[in-house]
Image: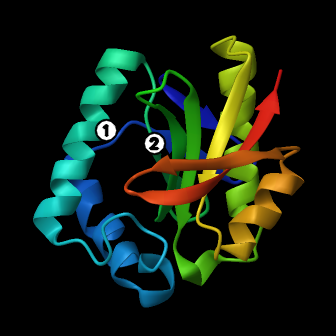
Amino acid sequence: MSYIETERLILRTWMPGDAPALYAIAQKPEVARYLITQKPTMEQVQAWIARETGLQERDGFSCWPVVRKSDGALIGRCGPRKMPEGYVEIAWVFDSAVWRQGYAQEAASAVIEYCLRSRQLSAVYALINPDNAASIALAYRLGMRFDRVVRAYKRDLLRYERHA
């Protein structure tokens, strides 16, 4: 993947200069409450970007930065990740300043299309905190259906699935 382009967004590989924007998003309490590492340090954000870059090289995909075309702002991250159990999870995190503007659905729809069509995966899954009503609603809008509760990232999460 060189990049995924939608009407309003570009999803691309990570660059070293992306860390400050991702860090700022992760510091917002309303965003941080659903993250695995709540309010990560800049060093943790940089290490996360380095890991994602490695996953991109190894697997051909990762959780990519989401950049708004209109102003070039990094507004979140969205992409697939291979789980230890073998299935592919699609994850998304967006700046609360852009919530309820359709960006998450636009990005996640493009990533699902990429996974099911270009990567020819038979299914993709989303792991969602049971308290995250907005992400659960998004999963349904993306055509995903509840599968089961799974233990991942040291917590119980709801797993939603979408098949090709």
Is disc 2 placed on a helix, strand or loop? loop
Q: Looking at the picture, how far across and down is residue 15, in whole percent? A: 27, 44
Q: Are marks 1 and 2 in contact (CB under 8 Å)?
A: yes
| Residue 41 seen by the camera | yes
Q: Say left or right for 15 vs 160.
A: left
How dense is the environment of label 1, judged by Cα within 10 Å: few (below 14), some, or many (20 and up)?
some
Residue for point 29% across, 70% down: 23
Q: Of callouts 1 and 2, which one flags the residue occurring earlier in the amino acid sequence?
A: 1
Is disc 1 placed on a helix, strand or loop? helix
Residue for point 45% across, 60% down: 155
Q: Say left or right for 10 vs 2.
A: right
Residue for point 51% across, 86% down: 30
- Seen from the viewer's position, the closer of residues 94 and 125 is 125
Q: Say left or right for 55 vs 106.
A: left
| Residue 68 seen by the camera | no
Quadrant placement of the C terminus:
top right
The residue at which mark 2 appears reads as 63
The disc at residue 163 is none
The disc at residue 52 is 1
The span from disc 1 to disc 2 (Cα, nearest Å) is 7 Å
How dense is the environment of label 2, judged by Cα within 10 Å: few (below 14), some, or many (20 and up)?
many
